Image (cartoon, grey):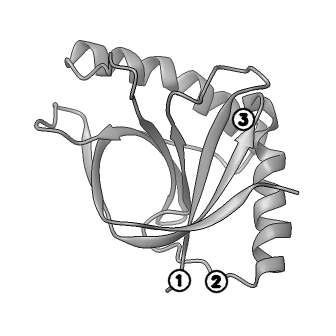
Amino acid sequence: MMKYELRELPSFSVIGLEQELTEQKSTNLERCLSFWPTFNRQLKSNGLSQQNAAWTKFAFMKRREARLIYYCAVPFTSKVPANFVLEEIPACKYLVVEHRGAMAHIYSTYADIYQGLIPKLGLSLEQTNFLHFEKYDEKFHWNRESSVIEIWVPLKA
């Protein structure tokens, strides 16, 4: 059984970079994975690298005018560099699920969430601002079996 919980999250602000995706999962996984090094370089060159042990990064999946957008972000602190986008994330109730293991298997976790867990729990989705987001922190270890990524799916109140 997949580990999950329902959690309330107050509004918060993030800054980041976005890119458009396709409708093909395999292409999107490749594009998302290759976007992270670019994003991390931009963080470093803008003095936004998170050097402490309590780092946090996000990846949002959004729809805009029928296009799929991938948005990598960090918590907003004090400045928005040129070419970065500031996003206000509204307070919301979420279904929070842990993806464990390699990134290559994340789509099977999403299938389990959207095709199994959400219908089983009878939840209604609130996908007005974004579809879901992934939270990366110190539990994330690139492609290790012990790696954990939290997937946050917004729910209707």
The correct choice, above or below, for 28 with respect to 144 in the image is: below
**Horizontal and vertical percent for residue 5?**
64, 64
CA gap, disc 1 to disc 3? 30 Å
Residue on which disc 3 sits: 27
Q: Which residue is mark 2?
A: 124
Q: Secondary structure at mark 1?
A: loop
Residue 73 versus residue 63 in the image, above or below = above
**Gap between marks 3 and 2, in whole Å?**
29 Å
Neighbours of disc 1 within 10 Å: few (<14), some (14-19), many (20+): few
Rendered view: 61 above or below 66: above
Quarter that holds the N terminus:
bottom right
- Front residue of this view, candidates 63 and 89: 89
Q: Residue at x 62, y 39 (%)?
A: 149
User: Looking at numbered disc 1 in the image, what kind of residue is underneath it?
Assistant: Lys
Q: Is residue 17 visible?
A: no
Give left or right: position of 118 versus 85. Answer: right
Q: Residue at x 24, y 13 (%)?
A: 45
**Residue at the location (35% across, 70% down)?**
91
Crowding near the residue tagged with mark 2, few <14, some 14–19, many ≥20 C-alpha atoms within 10 Å: few
Residue 156 circle label: 1
What secondary structure is found at the residue carrying circle 3? helix
x, y (%) of residue 55?
39, 28
Mark linked to residue 54: none
Pinpoint residue 3: horizontal percent, then vertical percent: 76, 55
Give the mark nearer the N terminus: 1 vs 3: 3
Are dots 2 and 1 in contact, CB under 8 Å?
yes
Of labels 3 and 2, earlier in sequence is 3
Q: Amino acid at mark 3?
A: Thr
Residue furthest toward the left? Answer: 78
Residue 96 located left or right of residue 138: right
Please name whichever residue, 58 or 96, is drawn nearer the observer in this view of the structure: 96
Mark 2 and mark 1: Cα distance apart in space: 6 Å
